Amino acid sequence: MIAVIPAAGIGQRMEASLPKQYLQCAGETLLDHSIAAILAEPRISKIFLALHENDHWFANSRFADHEQIQVVQGGASRAESVVNALSAAINTFPSDTLVAVHDAARPGLPLKLFSELLDVVNENPEQGALLALPVHDTVKYSTEKEAAANGGLTQTKDAGIGRNIVNKTLVRDHIWLAQTPQVFRLGDLQKALSLAAEQGNDITDEASAMETLGAQPILVPGSKKLLKVTTPDDLALIEFYLTTEQN
Ligand code: CTP
Ligand code: MG
């Protein structure tokens, strides 16, 4: 089994002075936490790490010269970065190799969950699997914006225009929030992501690309610790998760 870590993003929403994967948290960078979490699983023999072409931070990582890590150039989107890494991997690994794709921005991966996920995919390699979180809130579905305040009867200057309105309430038990790692066969995933790119689909995870090829990936319950660090207020939370032992 191998892994891909897309770490070529610029972290726009974090508004920091460097890409968020290089922010320090609980003793080391978010990226180093993510790499360490993947390498902790002995079944992973190699990590293909996608970095931005102008990256000058990874050279300072404790993993910079690690023999199990191969750096590849990232792309303009997360999906492109993953495709670049898969193209490098397919040169040295058979197409039925299982590949775990894990966001650099999710540094809190518990080893127990990663191992459980790999066990599930080993049994079901053609389906693949991902960690995902059941939701506890009531989920509203909204595709529409209100026309105006007061049901559109009175013209009030700018009042209410553009606010989202509820179309329906979804059945919460059917909703899962996709996390990573997501694990599929190398050849299948490369085909799925390349096809999605050709069709211009805006793919934000591996499972959705696989679904377009008819796959039915297995959902393995994930963890809040797997929070994707996105905005500044996520930093205090991830620090808490990285310094506490519970899953
Ligand atoms: N990523 C990547 N290549 C890109 C864009 C994103 O490898 N062109 C990676 C990020 O480094 C991150 C993961 O994909 O580990 C998830 O993406 P996201 O959380 O959106 O990170 P950024 O794109 O860096 O953040 P933002 O969207 O706020 O700019
Ligand atoms: Mg992004």
Image: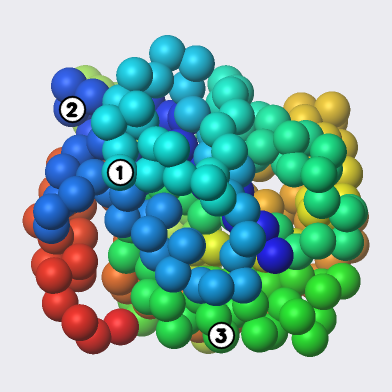
Task: Please state the total of marks drawn on the protein image.
Answer: 3
The percent position of residue 18, horizontal first and vertical second, equals 23, 24
The disc, 1 or 2, on the residue closer to the chain's N-terminal end is 2
The percent position of residue 26, horizontal first and vertical second, equals 13, 57
The percent position of residue 230, horizontal first and vertical second, equals 30, 44
Q: Secondary structure at mark 3?
A: helix
Viewer-proximal residue among 3 and 106: 3
How far is disc 3 from disc 1 in space, using C-alphas?
27 Å
How far is disc 2 from disc 3 in space, using C-alphas?
34 Å
Q: Secondary structure at mark 1?
A: loop
The disc, 3 or 1, on the residue closer to the chain's N-terminal end is 1
Q: Amino acid at mark 2?
A: Ala
* Res 78 quadrant in image: top right
Instruction: Tell me: 5 left or right of 247.
Output: right
Specify whether residue 204 is in view: no
The percent position of residue 103, horizontal first and vertical second, equals 47, 50
Q: Secondary structure at mark 2?
A: loop
The reply to whether the residue tagged 2 has its Cβ within 8 angstroms of ligand 1 is no
Q: Is residue 15 above or below residue 174?
A: above
- Disc 2 versus disc 3: nearer the observer: 3
- Mark 2 neighbour density, 10 Å: few (under 14) some (14–19) many (20 or more): some
Q: Name the residue carrying label 3.
A: 116
Residue appearing at x 89%, y 54% in the figure = 95
Q: Amino acid at mark 1?
A: Arg
Q: Name the residue carrying label 2.
A: 16
* Res 183 quadrant in image: bottom right
Q: Name the residue carrying label 1.
A: 62
- Mark 3 neighbour density, 10 Å: few (under 14) some (14–19) many (20 or more): some
